[in-house]
Image (cartoon, coloured by chain):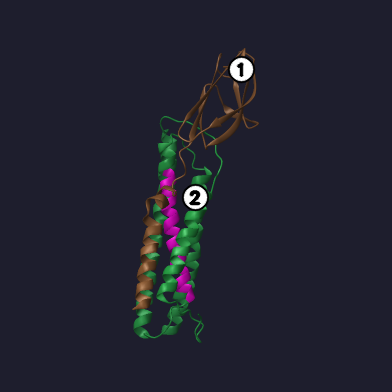
Chain colours: A brown, B green
């Protein structure tokens, strides 16, 4: 009787662990944040965390929540927006605009 | 516990306890895995991307179907073995096969959720870490399950002969 009770309790715990909503949501990664990078004039090179990307401005990237160092350079306007640290939060959009006068 | 015949005797509570620990371990692994990515946003998929996605999901479905079939075959062999000798313990290879295939099925579900997450987030990258690692775990745990199952089935057939 005692063993049956223990088995039943463990069975319930197993179902709870597998089906409880927090367990289900954790099976999907957190919503990414949006990093929107634009420039005037467009088609400048984007560098994120020291890595030059294939995509030119304007571009939108999906990234996990955290801090990113963004720089924009070259292109038709010969832009030179130095590295800037931005905080991207989950589900939110962070916009950066580079001009000849610097970041706006 | 190991019996004199080298087979495993697992009590009911111990089985559930092991299952709970396994689920919690996988859950903790998933919730604490913070993988980096930087994906360009897309508004729609190209024809090539759609075919890539179809091929990927086809493989996911195939492994899931094979895993389910393997579990059924394992159950069939275990029932037959139990009929032949009701007091015999369950071989550890059968337990290993069942555990590996169950974990494989779980990872198959995780991959499916990750694909939905990718599409909801408006990007396309089947090489994203959140899709790759459960995909790899899905395949290799299935492979390990097949290995255990083959060993169990082989010894089961030899015993019957």
- Residue at the (44%, 49%) spot, across then down: A26
**Residue B110 on the magenta segment:** yes
Please say whether residue B138 is visible from this viewpoint.
no
Confirm whether circles 2 and 1 share one chain. Answer: no
Q: Which mark is residue A75?
A: 1
Is residue A80 placed above or below B1 in the rendered structure? above
On the rendered structure, is B23 left or right of B35?
left
Please provide percent x and percent y for residue B56.
44, 47
Element at label 1:
loop
User: Which disc is residue A7 wearing?
Assistant: none
Report the Cα–Cα distance between label 2 and label 1. 41 Å
Q: Please state the horizontal and vertical placement of residue B55, each as a whole percent of the image.
A: 42, 46
Q: Nearer the viewer, residue A40 or A93?
A: A93
Placement of A22 over or under A90, stated as above or below? below
Secondary element at image label 2: helix
Q: Residues within 10 Å of mark 1 (few under 14, many from 20)?
A: some
Say if mark 2 contacts mark 1, CB within 8 Å.
Answer: no
Residue at the location (37% across, 66% down)? A11
Magenta range is B92-115
Q: For residue B31, which numbered disc appears in the image?
A: 2
Nearer to us in this view, B20 or B126 = B20
The subunit letter for the residue under badge 2 reads B
**Residue A92 appears anywhere in the view:** yes
Report the mark closest to the observer, 2 or 1. 2
Which of B70 and B15 lies nearest the eye of the viewer? B15
In the foreground, B15 or B96: B15
Q: Position of residue B79 (x, y in %)?
A: 35, 77
In the figure, A57 relative to B82: above or below? above
Q: Main secondary structure of the magenta part?
A: helix
Q: Quadrant of residue A103?
A: top right
Mark 2 packing: few (<14 Cα in 10 Å), some, or many (20+)?
A: some
User: Is residue A46 inside the magenta stretch?
Assistant: no
């Amino acid at each position: 009787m005692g063993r049956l009770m223990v088995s039943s309790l463990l069975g319930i715990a197993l179902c709870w662990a597998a089906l409880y909503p927090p367990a289900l949501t954790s099976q999907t990664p957190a919503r990414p944040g949006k990093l929107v990078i634009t420039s005037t004039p467009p088609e400048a090179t984007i560098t994120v965390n020291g890595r030059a990307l294939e995509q030119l401005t304007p571009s939108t990237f999906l990234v996990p929540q955290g801090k990113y160092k963004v720089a924009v350079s070259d292109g038709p306007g010969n832009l030179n927006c130095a590295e800037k640290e931005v905080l991207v939060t989950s589900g939110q959009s962070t916009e950066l605009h580079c001009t000849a006068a610097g970041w706006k | 516990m190991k019996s004199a015949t080298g087979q495993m005797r697992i009590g009911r509570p111990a089985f559930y306890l092991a299952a709970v620990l396994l689920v919690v371990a996988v859950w903790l692994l998933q919730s604490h895995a913070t993988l980096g990515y930087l994906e360009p946003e897309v508004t729609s998929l190209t024809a090539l991307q759609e075919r890539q996605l179809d091929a990927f999901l086809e493989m996911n479905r195939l492994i899931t179907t094979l895993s389910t079939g393997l579990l059924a075959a394992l159950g069939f062999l275990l029932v037959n073995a139990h009929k032949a000798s009701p007091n015999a313990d369950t071989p550890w290879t059968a337990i290993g096969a069942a555990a590996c295939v169950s974990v494989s099925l779980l990872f198959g579900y995780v991959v499916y959720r990750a694909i939905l997450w990718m599409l909801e987030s408006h990007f396309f990258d089947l090489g994203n870490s959140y899709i790759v690692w459960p995909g790899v775990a899905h395949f290799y745990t299935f492979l390990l399950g097949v290995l255990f199952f083959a060993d169990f089935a082989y010894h089961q057939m030899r015993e019957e002969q």
